[in-house]
Image (cartoon, grey):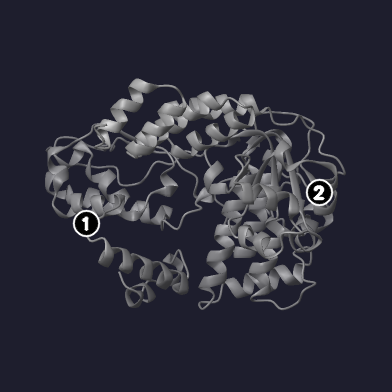
């Protein structure tokens, strides 16, 4: 698909702006021309579907997690692996296709194009191909909503509901399901700490900090303003995360850092007032009207992914959540969430008393604090945690973080062993051999030297 084809896609189905698509396509075009024999996962999926390689494979039950991260072509492949395409079910009635998907569209932080409507369309296409069997297939998708948040404390769960209320209000869309109910009950309330105070009272090494991807550039342009996190960024420290990196994990305490400043940058491109704040209903209305215009694809997409990133960041916290931001960030975003008088204006009407989004008890605003009253990170525990995750999932990012944590507690032998494992996993045999030698594993080093083609 080229830029001209992307322009023809309906606005509601676009997942990146046209400029972003053009930039990505330039990189893709360069890669294809320079490395014609290289491929990625989507290339493999496309080849499998085009050549009908699925015909010799069938699965009776398909269960997939993180379904919101599937692209449309991956959804097609998954559905075509079901055994129902292979057999005659003409004698069956109300046949249920045994495919189970778990996912949260509110956590879509990659532009995969996932939409519940796209999944439904792909499923209808699959069952349509079975029409020759005359099977009475259940065409509707059975949906079961997860109503409880089993990870986060009560205050964090209710605060995440408030984040989603802002999302729905600004985008002018209907809510997905009901606000979540907390499973863990505690008295801890999410707190706002000013950027100036944060840099006075604490070391950034003591906490897990989540930043929006766009904040990296903001920090590099003004490192003095963000000196604490700038130091983490420059040193590539293991306690600094983006939402994509921390997605799927959880931490006892999380600091959500600088998201308001990113939102300020996003909105300032469309709305020139530097004193604008979401706490003002007129400003929220102006954003909603702008987003709903047909030519506002860029702002809609930016806000969708901003709130998805924010939601993922907030819901990684189990016990304590702190929000840290500059004065500009507080004004544009967090002032709205610090005052019930402000956010209660967004509550929808509830004429029949059945709209859970209209119930104030499902929300929790921020409180202002001057201290980060929470237990600091235990580096050795973190090292062991990500070491175990690396063993279980073989995710290179977990291995890299484990190595860094081990080096912090001066367990260099284990760090070198892990580094050698990582090099082996990436088939970087010469570097793996050198890392094994540093760890004192001469026999493993010899094997890697052989695989590197060095017979010394």
Residue 77 in the image: x percent, y percent?
26, 47
> Residue drawn at (64%, 27%), measured in percent from left and top?
409
Who's the residue at 51% across and 24% down the image?
414
Residue 157 in the figure: left or right of residue 128:
right
Q: Secondary structure at mark 1?
A: loop
Task: Classify 10 Å Cα crowding around label 2: few (below 14), some (14-19), many (20 and above).
Answer: some
Is 42 positioned to the left or the right of 284 in the image? left
Q: Is residue 54 left or right of residue 10?
A: left
Q: Which quarter of the figure has residue 331? A: bottom right
Tell me: residue 411, above or below residue 46. above
Res 435 quadrant in image: top left
Q: Is residue 399 above or below residue 231?
A: above
Q: Is residue 129 above or below residue 456?
A: below
In whole angstroms, how far apart are the C-alphas of marks 1 and 2?
49 Å
Q: Could you tell me how many numbered marks the image carries?
A: 2
In which image quadrant can residue 204 be found? top right
Q: Is residue 153 left or right of residue 296?
A: right
**Which residue is under mark 2?**
199
Q: Nearer the viewer, residue 254 or 336?
A: 254
Q: Is residue 210 visible?
A: yes
For the residue pair 340 and 234, the one nearer the viewer reads as: 234
Labels 1 and 2 touching (C-beta < 8 A): no
Question: Residue 359: x, y in percent?
Answer: 72, 46
| Residue lying farthest to the front in this orientation | 456
> Which quadrant of the rendered structure holds the C terminus?
top left
Residue 354 visible in this rendered orientation of the protein: no
Q: Position of residue 351 (x, y in %)?
A: 68, 54
Residue at image position (29%, 42%) is: 138
Residue farthest to the right, as pictured: 370
Assign the N terminus to one quadrant of the image. Answer: bottom left
Q: Where is mark 1, residue-wise?
A: 37
């Amino acid at each position: 698909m080229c830029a001209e084809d992307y322009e023809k896609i309906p606005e509601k189905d676009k997942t990146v702006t046209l400029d972003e698509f053009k930039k990505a396509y330039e990189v893709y075009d360069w890669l294809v021309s320079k490395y014609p024999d290289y491929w990625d996962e989507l290339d493999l999926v496309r080849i499998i579907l085009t050549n009908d390689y699925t015909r010799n494979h069938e699965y009776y039950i398909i269960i997939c997690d993180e379904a919101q991260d599937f692209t449309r072509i991956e959804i097609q492949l998954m559905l075509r692996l079901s055994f129902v395409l292979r057999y005659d079910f003409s004698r069956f009635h109300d046949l249920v296709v045994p495919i189970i998907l778990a996912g949260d569209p509110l956590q879509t932080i990659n532009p995969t194009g996932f939409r519940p409507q796209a999944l439904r369309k792909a499923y209808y296409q699959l069952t349509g191909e079975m029409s020759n069997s005359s099977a009475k297939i259940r065409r509707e998708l059975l949906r079961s909503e997860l109503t409880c948040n089993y990870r986060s404390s009560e205050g964090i769960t209710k605060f995440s509901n408030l984040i989603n209320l802002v999302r729905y209000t600004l985008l002018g869309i209907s809510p997905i399901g009901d606000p979540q109910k907390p499973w863990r009950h505690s008295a801890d309330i999410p707190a706002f700490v000013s950027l100036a105070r944060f840099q006075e009272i604490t070391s950034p090494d003591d906490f897990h900090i989540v930043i929006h991807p766009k904040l990296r550039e903001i920090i590099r342009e003004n490192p003095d303003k963000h000196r604490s996190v700038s130091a983490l960024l420059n040193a590539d420290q293991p306690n600094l995360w983006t939402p994509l990196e921390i997605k799927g994990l959880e931490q006892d305490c999380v600091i959500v850092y600088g998201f308001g400043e990113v939102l300020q940058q996003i909105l300032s491109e469309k709305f020139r007032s530097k004193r604008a704040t979401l706490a003002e209903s007129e400003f929220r209305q102006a954003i909603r009207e702008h987003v709903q215009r047909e030519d506002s694809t860029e702002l809609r997409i930016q806000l969708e992914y901003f709130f998805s990133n924010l939601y993922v960041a907030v819901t990684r916290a189990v016990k304590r959540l702190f929000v840290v931001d500059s004065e500009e960030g507080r004004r544009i975003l967090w002032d709205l969430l610090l005052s019930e008088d402000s956010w209660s204006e967004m509550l929808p009407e509830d004429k029949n008393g059945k709209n859970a989004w209209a119930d104030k008890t499902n929300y929790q605003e921020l409180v202002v604090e001057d201290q980060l009253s929470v237990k600091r990170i235990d580096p050795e525990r973190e090292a062991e945690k990500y070491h175990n995750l690396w063993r279980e999932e073989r995710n290179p990012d977990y291995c890299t973080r484990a190595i860094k944590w081990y080096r912090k507690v001066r367990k260099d032998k284990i760090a070198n062993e892990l580094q050698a494992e990582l090099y082996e996993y990436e088939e970087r045999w010469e570097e793996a051999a050198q890392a094994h030698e540093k760890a004192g594993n001469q026999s493993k080093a010899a094997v890697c030297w052989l695989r590197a083609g060095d017979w010394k």
